[in-house]
Image (cartoon, coloured by chain):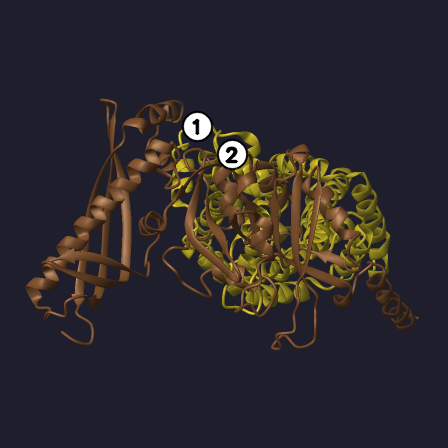
Chain colours: A brown, B yellow
Amino acid sequence: MKKIICCLLAIAMPWTISGCQFKDIDKRSFVLAIGIDRPEDKDKKNQFEVTLKMAIPEGDPTKRSQEPVVITEIAESVPEAVRLAKSKTDKELDFSHCKAMIYGESLARDNIIPLVDWSSRRRDIQLIMFVAVGQPTAREVVKMQTKSERLPGNALILGLGKEGTESPYIKSAYSFDLSRRTTEHGLDPFMPVVRTKHPDMLIIDRVALFNKQKLVTILSPDETRMLNLLTSNHLRSSFKVDAEGNSFDYNLENSKAKYRIKADKEKKAIVEYHLSGKASLEENMKGTPVTGPVLRAISKAASEKWERDSVKLFKKIQASGVDPFGWGLRYYSRNWNNSTERQDWERLFPGLEFQVKADLKVKYTGMIR
Amino acid sequence: MVSSKYIYYLFLVNALMNIINFVPRVLIFTRFQGTLPSIFISTAIGALLLYGFTKGIAGFKGQGLPEIFNANLPRFFSFFLLIMYACFWFSAGIITMLSFVDITVRYISPDISPYAVIIGFLLLSAICCRLSSESILYGLETILFLSTPVIIYMLVKAFLNPNFSWDAVLQIVTYMWTKPKYVTVAGATFIFSGFFNLAIFNRNFKELKTRYLWTIPLFGLVILLITFVVPIGYQGTVGVENHVYSWFSTADSIRMELFIIERVLFLFYTIYLMISMLSTVVHWHVGLELFKGAFQSKSGKLPGKKADWWVLIPFSIATIVIMNFLNQVRLGQIGQWFLNIRLINEFVLLAILFYAKKRSAKKT
């Protein structure tokens, strides 16, 4: 009797598997990148133009036969546009492998909140998706097919992340980071900016700063690199410095940035940064021999240059009124007067002063002296 | 008979399981109004309950709660109490299961019918909870051995990630001097209540050797702090409230660049599926044994194995019926009510246990 019941149960089990409307992989198309713009059409100013870059699963991923499918659709909301796009394709759209979301510049200058909400609310969109601002439009960026791209959307994904190229000008941002920054007090969002260069290139060398809602300012490549240096450890980059009537390029091998905020009662606060790094020489313009004193002089000049550049960047960011570094959060986290700290900080922020102490050591001259 | 180390596993499975739904929810919900002091208070309360209960039950060697109650309390009371506690233990399992059905439908496949998922879970726990207590303890050990290293790996990964914001965590720490709340204390003490499963599993211990009992409050405190702090480090002090399953969102925010799969979420889901099913099985096993204990005859004979289904099938049907009524918000409320009542109930259980102990001391 028992055996019969067990057998029947075993036979009954597979029915539950077939009951779940599962769609096979060859009936799915995987969305790998989404781009969202405001339509250029003046009448549709408040609508959304959604561009989906999709890959159709194929047998052999090593062959470069993968042609992406790009669908663009305009609707009053993003989900609506996605539904419309669904009726343009024969396969089920699958967002679970979507790794990049591009906010068109026009949209980013308007309001990003509904999209941040949409992408974190949807269950199948990853929170570790990369986000970026697209110039001139997100559609252009998503559509761009670079020469080096072997899988659809891969150039964008590798470019924004750190697995492929590791450029000091790329400050990558994840979706969960963006969504936390849109809500957190004293910490504002940023996103890298992806530009297209015809015929087949994507350039990522700037970073866009946001207040909680919209794009406020875009930093230049040099400022972006400085921001990267100030916000992350172990940045790999090269910098140029003039010293001893000569011009040198050094390669940063290790870097570290930390800061603290000194606030006193008299309505004044100082942000004290301490930068340190180790570097080796990469180029020497005039080819004069590099001795110990020269190395020290280069180190000193480079440190001073860092100090000047970073203070300039701080002043610029302060003037635009945003806080991508999270100074506000740092201030709140170090102060116990929870009810008044936010008013205090709002009062302090415009008058913030910056002190940067850079301690860069150029230690090696490279393979030759 | 099993060795004393299994006591710690009983604690550990509850402590690990808590992070899937209700405990982090209440901790995060009151993060500006007294979570941190509540955590410290509940560690003290948890330690108190823990020492009380082990001291109490260690006096009855090899006896479960049914034997203790039936021998030392008036028959009517013991029957009533055992049925009540059985329902309580069953509902603990049901709530875990329902949360996980919701999570499965949400994260794995929204197309799948929740009924298919719940039937799978019910079959598993109903069949497994009929095993002997000893097999369940061995299963507990095996699964914890498999999953704990992965959990530790994920935690290390979470803390070493440069995107983990210590400033957000410290900002929450500055809310230390706020008034603790009962709901938060009730939620936080839940992680210590794995111990109460000794109510049945005490039958299998020859002697409760509790030399390292002091490690449990310590571990409990660390686990509570981790439960509370990691989602805040990833979702921010304000944004963390927006996430329904804050730990699953947190797992989704961590990336393993150089692993077979990139999303920690799926690893996390699999591990927690194991642990929460295990915890359901343990709870249901205790519930079942308590229920059967209520019908213990005067001569001490327990109802036979076949009677199990008369308990399990009604509870399984009840689970499906409850699931029908619930949406996400109601499930959260019911879970919180369960936690609130649980804390009082544990104190009541402790008081009855000591009363029974007194009675049994008088008898001899």
Q: Position of residue B255 (x, y in %)?
A: 51, 59
A261 or B155: nearer the viewer: A261
Give amino acid for label 1. Answer: Thr
Q: Is residue B193 left or right of residue B75?
A: left
Q: CA distance from mark 2 to mark 1?
A: 32 Å
B14 or B193: nearer the viewer: B14
Chain at numbered mark 1: B
What secondary structure is found at the residue carrying circle 2? loop
Q: Is residue B240 left or right of residue A219?
A: right
Give the crowd class for mark 1: few <14, some 14-19, many >=20 residues within 10 Å. some
Q: Nearer the viewer, mark 2 or mark 1?
A: 2
How many numbered discs? 2
Residue A94 in sight here: yes
Q: Residue at x 67, y 55 (%)?
A: A95
B352 or B20: nearer the viewer: B20
Residue under label 1: B178
Q: Is residue B188 left or right of residue A74?
A: left
Residue under label 2: A213
Q: Residue at x 33, y 55 (%)?
A: A233
Q: Position of residue A182 (x, y in %)?
A: 50, 37
A295 or B221: nearer the viewer: A295
